[in-house]
Image: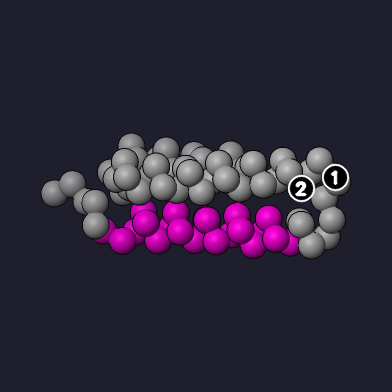
Amino acid sequence: QAQLDRRIDQGVRSGQLSRREATRLRSEFNSLVRLEGQYRRGGLSAWERTDLDRRFDRLSAQIRYERNDRDNRRH
């Protein structure tokens, strides 16, 4: 999780992500952290762990896409 947050920060600093893209990605990230907290209250089931892994993987792919889509290059 910390790595995803760092990747968003690095994307903003390098100019690969706009503030708007970063805000949207951080919002998704924070939603997932809250969902994980809800799941953990009752103990993580195998399904919940799989669901979280899938959601975090999808967010990671979104970050990768947004950082490489070239719509925010500074040139």
The region drawn magenta spans 50-70
Q: Which kind of residue does numbered mark 1 sit on?
A: Gly
Image quarter for residue 63?
A: bottom left
Identity of the residue drawn at 67% across and 47% down: 35
Asked whether disc 2 touches disc 1, contact meaning CB atoms under 8 Å apart, the reply is yes
Please, what secondary structure does the residue beneath circle 1 have? loop
Apparent side of residue 4 relative to residue 63 in the rendered image (left or right): right
Identity of the residue drawn at 64% across and 41% down: 34
Q: CA distance from mark 2 to mark 1?
A: 6 Å
Residue 39 numbered mark, or none: 2
Quadrant that contains the N terminus = top right
Identity of the residue drawn at 36% across and 54% down: 67
Q: Which residue is mark 1?
A: 42
Image quarter for residue 53?
A: bottom right
User: Could one spot residue 4 in this view of the protein?
Assistant: no
Measuring from the top left, give residue 5's x and y in whole percent: 51, 40
User: Tag count in the figure?
Assistant: 2
Nearest the eye: 70 or 53: 53
Nearest the eye: 69 or 20: 20
Q: What is the chief secondary structure element of the magenta stretch? A: helix
User: Could one spot residue 70 in this view of the protein?
Assistant: yes
Apparent side of residue 25 relative to residue 41 in the rendered image (left or right): left
Measuring from the top left, give residue 10's x and y in whole percent: 40, 40
Whether 47 is among the magenta residues is no
Identity of the residue drawn at 79% across and 62% down: 47
Please, what secondary structure does the residue beneath circle 2 have? helix
Whether 63 is among the magenta residues is yes
Q: Which kind of residue does numbered mark 2 sit on?
A: Tyr
